[in-house]
Amino acid sequence: MKSEKKTNRALPLAALALLLGGALVLPGCSTTASSSSGPINFISSSDSTPDAEESTSTTEGEVSSSETSSSDDLPTDPLLRKYVLGLREGADLSETLTIQEIMTLVPRLWAENENNTWYCNGKAVSFGLSQDIQSAGIKAGDSYFSESISKGVLTTGARAYQDADGVDVYRTEKAEAETGKPLVATWGTEATSYTLDEYAESWGYTLDHFGNYYFGDYEQDGVVKNTIITEPTSSEDTAQLSYAKRLETGHYEVYIRLDTVGGVLNYQRQMVTLSGLQDLPPFEFCNLTFELDEELLPISCKVHEKYTATLAALPIPAPTEANLEIAYFPGATASIPELSQAVDYSTSGLFE
């Protein structure tokens, strides 16, 4: 993989419906960045990797970290200890853990798996024009893959292949699909090659992270906030607040009303890079509804969001509303496709 330089290629100029829904679940990066409203410093991140902090395995009661208390087999990390104790006691984790703690654990548990896959499908609408959105991601050991395809009035998309040396990105040339079937894209053969740092700077994340939404504390203009909104932001604020609850199945529903500054910054950076936007697109709202299993591994997520995107080449603000569904398969093995191969969406359950 080339990591010493980038290939200069013009970004495709999509019109109003370049909605980038596939970007919603591509891995996020919790690096310090800035926006037009002032510098943002991410104080803590839910995207901690096992190398950075002790982490649990996905098997109840087991701990993958070698650092455990000398008096018992529980992890020394306070949050992991709280989590493992809750599992052993059969506790309702939505009561014993805060929403912030749950969304700190989800990426860490996800990252513990040697293999993972996820798929996304949905639509977005701008000025009455509908755009189909489709994406997928694969973790296979130390190799990572993602693709995002959007088709409507125009077609756009990107494929990314990541290993220890960097990331190669290929652009979509065309995409077609039969009714009710996944889009199948034809990819250009010339890659834009990035180092991992370059890719994180341009796209807001690297592919080894769980998602490009940020769940955690950030500081802006001297004020510290958490990106998961659990309290009204003003006396006029009547929107649904974030919550977590255990379902009758034993699974958990976690609704995230995401802060539209720090929570979406990495996503905004990706949108600018992929679509050639004039600036970071402001968000009106971004709401995520996760279903997690008994051990807080992700099963699905429904996304409802609204933002305004303005292309640099066509400076007309375009209000855009998207609804998408993500299916997660923690631990599932899938082969990373060659550039000429299509992703197998047959097991996603998102197409009929």
Image (cartoon, helix red, strand yellow):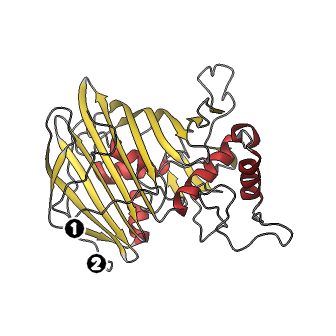
Along the line of sight, which residue is nearer the eye, 322 or 306?
322
Give the CA separation, mark 2 to mark 1. 9 Å
Residue 280 seen from this side: no
| Residue highlighted by disc 2 | 2
**Label drawn at residue 191:** 1
At label 1, counting other C-alpha atoms closer than 10 Å, the crowd grade (few under 14, some 14-19, many 20 or more) is many
User: Would residue 310 be found to the left or right of residue 81 on screen?
Assistant: left
User: Would residue 291 be found to the left or right of residue 89 on screen?
Assistant: left
Point 61% across, 57% down: residue:
59
Q: Quadrant of residue 152?
A: top left
Which amino acid is tagged 1? Ala
- Which circle's residue, 2 or 1, is located before the other in the chain? 2
Point 64% across, 68% down: residue:
64
* Residue at the bottom extreme of this rendering: 4
Along the line of sight, which residue is nearer the eye, 149 or 102?
102
Point 53% across, 56% down: residue:
110
What percent of the width, then of the height, locates residue 90? 73, 43
Along the line of sight, which residue is nearer the eye, 348 or 185?
348
What percent of the width, then of the height, locates residue 182? 22, 41
Along the line of sight, which residue is nearer the eye, 344 or 6?
344
What percent of the width, then of the height, locates residue 316? 28, 34
Q: Are marks 2 and 1 in contact (CB under 8 Å)?
A: yes
